[in-house]
Amino acid sequence: MKTSCEIIKDILPLYCDGICSEETQKLVEEHIAACPSCAVLLEKLRVDCHSVNTQSQLKETDMFRKASEKWKKSIWRAFCKGAAAIAAIAVLATTGHYGLCEVNIIHAAPDLVDSISYEIEGDPNNIAVVLNTNDGYFNGTIVSETDKDGNIYLSIARPIIKEKNRAGDNLQIIYTVNIENKSAVYYGTPEDSKLLWDTNSDLPEITYKEISKLHENTSIHE
């Protein structure tokens, strides 16, 4: 019995997709061989099916491409964030170490410093002050401030983390102070200080040569 074109037209999409049975496939092929109209329709279905498949593949390819780009961007952002975090930690560590161990912001209290003041022979406008710490720490630098009344305040500034000398040596600083038109020289701060010189002081004399010899025997020169 000859199969009608209407039945074949209903079957053609299944045949085109390759999901019909072998008997149905044979039936369609026999009909197509004898029916130019259904053969043209099958060819059109194949073209449309190929176009749909191609578009589907393009969509899938585009989807994977976008997913890949998104993943790469995500990885790059994560890398940048990680690198920035590591750099920030390194900067903080370096800054923290520098701030704690190198920046002199803590002033040694007067009871931690022994002092001797000298009048410099032949130079009435200057005195020499020798400051020696007595706590075994040897890092620090001299700080000088003058108030509006002409009082000079000297102090030894140290970092928060002080350096202990294994040999037990203390810090010695020799400092020359200009006392012209000054009222007094103190070690410490206005709130906690001891007098090193004032206009009524009678100090022992020292020469610049003797000051130089003192400098030769100290690790820090001011």
Image (cartoon, helix red, strand yellow):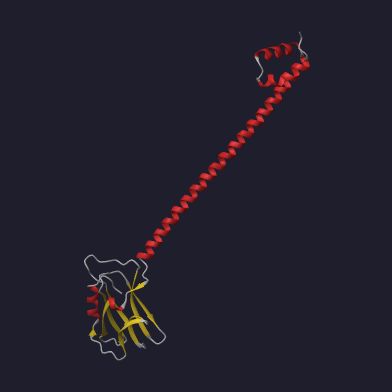
Quarter of the image where one finds residue 53: top right
Task: Classify 36 as above or below 159.
Answer: above
Relative depth, front residue between 192 and 1: 1
Q: Is residue 164 visible?
A: yes
Residue extending furthest bottom? 200
* x then y, percent, for residue 88: 45, 56
Q: Residue at x 36, y 83 (%)?
A: 152
Q: Position of residue 32 (x, y in %)?
A: 73, 14
Name which residue lies at 30% across and 91% down: 200
Of residues 205 and 7, the one drawn nearer to the viewer in this rendering:
7
Most extreme residue toward the top is 1
User: Residue at the location (40% across, 62% down)?
Assistant: 96
**Quarter placement of the C terminus:** bottom left
> Residue 184, image x and y in percent?
34, 87
Residue at (54, 45) in percent of width and height? 73
Above or below — where is 212 with respect to 27? below
Q: Is residue 182 left or right of residue 73?
A: left
- The picture quadrant where one finds residue 114 is bottom left
Q: Quadrant of residue 52?
A: top right
* Circle count: 0
Out of 8 and 88, give the one closest to the viewer: 8
Q: Looking at the picture, how far across and down is residue 119, in whole percent?
A: 26, 86
Q: Which quarter shows the N terminus? A: top right
Q: Is residue 179 visible?
A: no
